[in-house]
Every structure is written in structure tokens, then in C-alpha cells.
Amino acid sequence: MRVVSIAAAAAAGAATAFASTSALAQTAAKIDPADTAWMISATALVLMMTIPGLALFYAGMVRKKNVLATMAQSLVATALCSILWAGLGYTLAFGGDAPLLGTLDRVLLRGMGMDAVSPFAKTIPEALFMLYHMAFAVITVALVAGSVADRMRFSAFLWFAALWLIVVYVPIAHWVWGGGFLAAAGMLDFAGGTVVHLDAGVAGLVAAIVLGARLGYGSDNFAPHDLSLAVIGTGLLWVGWFGFNGGSALAANSRAVFAILATHLAASTGALTWMALEWWTRGKPSVLGMISGAVAGLGTITPASGFVLPWHGVIIGLIAGAMCFWSCTRLKRFWGYDDSLDVFGVHGIGGATGTLLVGVFAVSAVGGTAGWLEGNGSQVLIQLYGIAVTMAWSATATFVLLKAISIFIPLRVDKQSEIEGLDVTQHGEALQ
Amino acid sequence: MKLIIAIIKPFKLEDVRDALTAIGVRGMTVTEVKGYGRQKGHTEIYRGAEYAVNFLPKIRIEIAVAADEADKVVEAISAAAKTGQIGDGKIFVAPIEQAVRIRTGETDAGAL
């Protein structure tokens, strides 16, 4: 069980209050083969979500001249953030339960022996726990890239990815999952509604605004060059999400299965909802709409998946489909920002919505914490607090980082390169 | 010699090829092209963003034939490519000044 729920129960005055402190002591726990086997599989599933899942999902939605550059962002986010996570990110996120940041005890994986276990997951090797969360860090950074697709300079993206991981992702992961102040406040986020989706969505929105709209935005044809790639990517994301949400139980147990079931139902409902709304308002049910709805459902159920009943997934998927459809088609046009691949519209809005809804629907028999419907109305306020903190930190730090990087490297490619396409100008390659 | 250029709907290509083969046409050049005429384009919608697609995909067929065969070829293409709907395409006939078969060096009628 994840420490957020333990801490949440403690905040609610439950008898497990002492568990949250004793759990952090390095006890000689027994490594469970079943849990370990499941978590190895779940880790692979989550990594598959970024490469090739997200790479295909994003690359299918851009124009043909930017396909490789878009894939390169997912690929390099994986490689770069993996090394940074193992070297520094993990220890700052999960190496201690101070309110603001972890310690440097595990820097460069120091002291992480074969039989080491993390206090957050006492039945699997700590190296596996580190690896599982590495895949989360990777996909969060890769998600942000969708907002600045078609125009960000590759070298600037590399700096941004590295710094954003350490400055934005790691602290929020610590606050929510690593025993930080949001965990202590009792905030619920099973698999990353705030840490992954809202965090990335807000950063994407800020980055899209700082970089500015693509040349020809609103007048030129930006139609996706090959949505079939995006459909394949969505399938990989959807299946991978079983590891993302199911694995967040950190054990091979019923809670993992409930999380997977709620996840699958939410994805299905999200896809159908977006399809129906588009059919109704636009006359045709587009394939892009169906996959967007599925990803919206997946992102939105993420924080709730291990705290609610499977049927809540249907309700949450329905709300997710409607909210994200509205934000991508109305809110975006109203504000006029150019979030290329709707990272904010799908992941930001979805992550915030799901994080709020877990406060409404949480069932104590599932995750140990009751929500509003079970009489614990204050949980909604705690969730709102977590959403506000995540948004504020992600927005502020992302803005400062981008401005700082832009002192040394232009964030955007020059106009001519943007017209020619990033594939050939950034990477010297092109699809024929 | 005449050069016959036909712009047709893509899904009619096989019908046209069959019709031309039936009247003895032994070769043609086919290109995927885009364009518009009276059919104009259509609108595509991606997550609420509407794009007008002005150029529709068409197939361009080029056939070089002896002058006295041109009418027959034009009729065959017309019959095979016709759906009666807007956007069926057009056929142009132009004179050819010279033709050369690269392999043998034959010219004009012998090169067709």
C-alpha cells in the first residue's frame, strides 16, 4: 500500500497513525516473489507507454515534417530522465520523508543492495521500486513535449527535460508520494493525477504560452499526418495503463485488480463519451475523438483508481470525456493558446478532475480512506489543496526554467526551420 | 500522335485500365495528384479545429496514341470513369511533336 493512503488514514485519525512513522524505518522485510513478478511486469508496461506508446500517439498527430522530431522527444526523455532519476531524482523523491524534499542517501543508488527494500514498498526489491517510478518520471517529462511539438529546439528541450525533472517532477512526487507535506495532509493520488498528469498538463500550457503559437496557427492546415499511428499509440498507452494504475498498488493483490478494472472502464466510457459528444455537435464521430476520449478517461481515473469501486470508473470516465472534450474544443479556442497536442486539455484538465473526484468517490473498503459520498466531505478540500499546490509549483517553476534556459539557448527553432520541418533541420533526417 | 491526359477519381483507376486494355492500349503513366474543380474541397475537423481541404486526391493518367485512335480512347475513359457525381474529372487531348523509345531509338509511331 502506498504511503499516501497510510498518511491519509493517519490524518483522518485512524488507528494506523503509527504505521506511517514505523513504516519509514528500514525493516528487514521479506521480498515477495508474486509482488516482485507483477511489479517487474508493471514497470515494463509503464515504460512501454512512453516508448513506443506516447511516441506513436504524438507522432501520429503532428505534420509529416515533424514526425521524427516528435518521436525523438519521447525517446530522449526516456534515456535522459532514466539516468537522472537513478542518479539524483529517486533519492530526492523517495529518500526520506521530510516535508519538502528527500535526502541524498541514495544518490547514484548508493547503498541500494540486492536485499534493500523501500519503506514505501516492503515486499519488492528497492531497485524495482526505483525502476517503477523511473518509468513514471520518464512519461511525465515526455508528456510535456506534446504542448511544444512542431517548434521547440531540440537542444533546448534536452535542457528543459533534465531541469524540469529535478525541479518540478521530483519535488511534487516527494510531496504526494514520498512522505512530503501533501501526503501528510492526507491527499489522495493513487497513480499520478497530480504528480504526472496535472503536473505535465500545466507545464505544457505554460511552455506553449512561453514559446508562442506555431507559425500559421489558426490559418494553416495542421491536420495530423497519420492518425493510424496515434491509434496504435493509444492502444499501447491503454494496455500500459494497467501497469501504471494496477502497479501503483505495489503488490499483486485485489487492490491492483480493482484499479485495473476501474481504469479499463473509465477508458472505455471516456472514448464513448467523446465520440458521442462529437457526433452530436460536429456531425461525425472522429477516430481522433475516440482516442482522445480514451486517454482522457485513463488520465482522469489515474488518481482515483485504487481508492474507488470499479463502477466509479464509468462515472469518472463519463465526466472525463465531457470535461476534456470541452477543454480541447472550447476552452482552448476561448483562450487562444496553442497547446499543440492538447496536453493541458487532456492531461491537465483530466488530472485535476480525477484528483478532485477521488475526494468525492473514495471508498474506505478499497483504499482505506472515505470520500464525500461516505461522509468525509473534507477530503474534497484536501484534494483541492493538492491540486492548487501542484498547479502553482508546476506553473511557476516551469516558467522560470524556460526563461532561464532561453538566456542561453533560443527555445524555438528559427522561422525557416519551423517551415521546413524539425525532422530535417533538427535531426538531418526526414520521412520520405 | 496525341497525348491524352485524364484526371479521374482514384477508385476508378482499375475500371479505366481494364477498359483501355480491352481496346488495345498497351501502356500508360499514372500519377497521384491533388487538385480541385467544381467539386471544390471538404472540411476536416480535429479536436474542434476545422481545416478546409481544398485539394482533393485524384489520379492523372497519361497515354500517348496515334491520332486516329484518340477518340476511341477518350470514349473508353469517359465511359469507365463516369459515376455521374460531381468530381468525376476531365480529359484533355494535346498534340505530340515527337516520341522516342529510349531502348531502341525508334521514333514517333514506332515508339508508341
Image: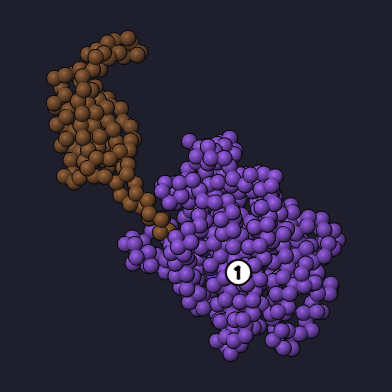
Q: Residues within 10 Å of mark 1 (few under 14, many from 20)?
A: many
What secondary structure is found at the residue carrying circle 1? helix
Q: Is residue B101 left or right of residue A384?
A: left
Residue occupying the point 47% across, 73% down: A319
Q: Quadrant of residue A18?
A: bottom right
Give amino acid for label 1. Gly
* Chain of the residue on which disc 1 is drawn: A
Tint applied to chain A in the drawing: purple
Find residue A125 and report its horizontal and vertical position in percent.
77, 65
Q: Which residue is mark 1?
A: A193
Q: Classify residue A243 by image quadrant.
A: bottom right
Q: Is residue A269 visible?
A: no
**Hue of chain B?**
brown
The reply to whether residue B52 is in sight is yes
Who is closer to the viewer here, A334 or A203? Answer: A334
| A10 w.r.t. B12: above or below | below
User: Residue at point 19% right, 25% down?
Assistant: B93
Q: In the image, is residue A89 above or below residue A362?
A: above
Relative to A173, is A257 on the left or the right? Answer: left
- Front in this rendered view, residue A397 or A262: A397
